[in-house]
Amino acid sequence: MPRHWTAEVPSSVFGLQGSCIVIPCSFNYPEPKIKPSELTGIWFKGAYEVIYHPDSSSIIKDYRGRTELVGDLRQKNCSLRIDPLHHSDKGPFTFRLEIKDHSKASYKDDTVSIAVSMREEVKVGEEVSASCSVSHSCPSDPPLLTWSHSGTPSIQSQQQTNGQWEETSSMTIRSTIADNNQPLVCTAAYRGGKTVSSSKTLNVKYAPVDVKVEGVSSVKEGDSVELRCSSDSNPAAHSYRWHNSRGPLPTMGPTITLERVTRLTEALYCTASTQRDKANPAH
């Protein structure tokens, strides 16, 4: 059996103004031979200001209706909830235990971050696993985590040290070309209206698409004309090949000039490719 009055509370707890905060607290005391019939938990700000008492009339005006003992004293849990948190709620706060027909003692001796993680470089069509974590101090009203990309996220909540909890949202998406260079944003909305966002930009690798040959729309016989091969890819096309119906032409770049065109000049085809992908043709 314990011989001393002891309590475990963090030295400090960080919360968000307008949201709620839970101060984790556990205690012990020299138990009397006869099991106590009634335990009363009281919280003080400073030495004299009562911020929680079972009799609400004993609570100072600024804290009346904002504090709740969420711990079960029978389980030696004295955790206190403050909701909503005000800027002035800086403490120090002290827990006091009173045991009916026995003893009483005060235990005097004893912003927001958000992170998104994912693999940022993927190939088109690959699945991307993203997770978003945020710390908070209100387990009964955790922040709502939302994503800018459609999907079905899973939520996990885990208690940390010093009265903090971590809320994590995980989601898997299948990357598309439209996702390239687009931010994947995670937003945490706290009770009280405060929001915090963080993002990562997707780098989706894909082979050349929309390959086409461009040039002037009309030309006279005997003129010279320059044709340009364009494409959309990530990374950008590394090489271009030109050919006609008879086979490849010596020109290797994205442009080719035809001298003295006639009505018999053949159609040209262009093939674009990156270093890692197969070529895609256009004409």
Image (tube, helix red, strand yellow):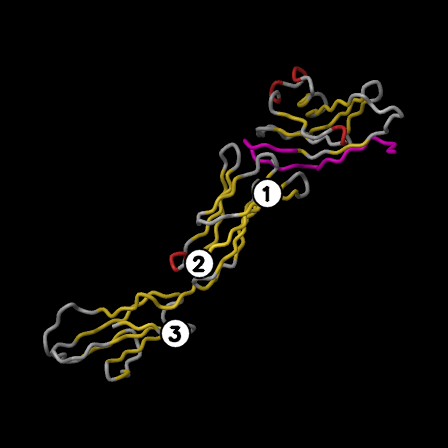
> Mark 1 and mark 3: span between their CA atoms?
46 Å
Would residue 274 be found to the left or right of residue 89 on screen? left
Residue type at mark 2: give it: Ser
Residue, x 37% and y 66% (percent of image)?
233
* Secondary element type, mark 1: strand
> Mark 2 and mark 3: span between their CA atoms?
20 Å
Residue, x 60% and y 34% (percent of image)?
140
Which of 216/76 is in front? 76
The stretch of residues the image draws in magenta is 1-22
Q: Residue furthest right?
A: 33
**Label 1 CA crowd tier, 10 Å (few <14, some 14–19, many 20+):** many
Quadrant where the N terminus is found in the figure:
top right
**Label 2 CA crowd tier, 10 Å (few <14, some 14–19, many 20+):** some
Q: Position of residue 187 (x, y in %)?
A: 49, 44
> Mark 2 and mark 1: span between their CA atoms?
28 Å
Q: According to the image, label 2 marks what residue?
A: 175
What main secondary structure does the magenta stretch of the protein show?
loop
Residue, x 88% and y 32% (percent of image)?
3
Looking at marks 2 and 1 on the same chain, the residue that comes earlier in the sequence is marked by 1
Q: Position of residue 98 (x, y in %)?
A: 78, 22
Q: In which quadrant of the rendered view does residue 280 lie?
A: bottom left
Residue, x 56% and y 33% (percent of image)?
19
Q: Is residue 78 magenta?
A: no
**Across the whole image, how many numbered discs are drawn on residues?**
3
Looking at marks 1 and 3 on the same chain, the residue that comes earlier in the sequence is marked by 1
Q: Residue furthest left?
A: 221
Looking at marks 2 and 3 on the same chain, the residue that comes earlier in the sequence is marked by 2
Q: According to the image, label 1 marks what residue?
A: 135
Which mark is nearer the camera, 2 or 1? Answer: 2
Q: According to the image, label 3 marks what residue?
A: 278
Quadrant where the C terminus is found in the figure:
bottom left
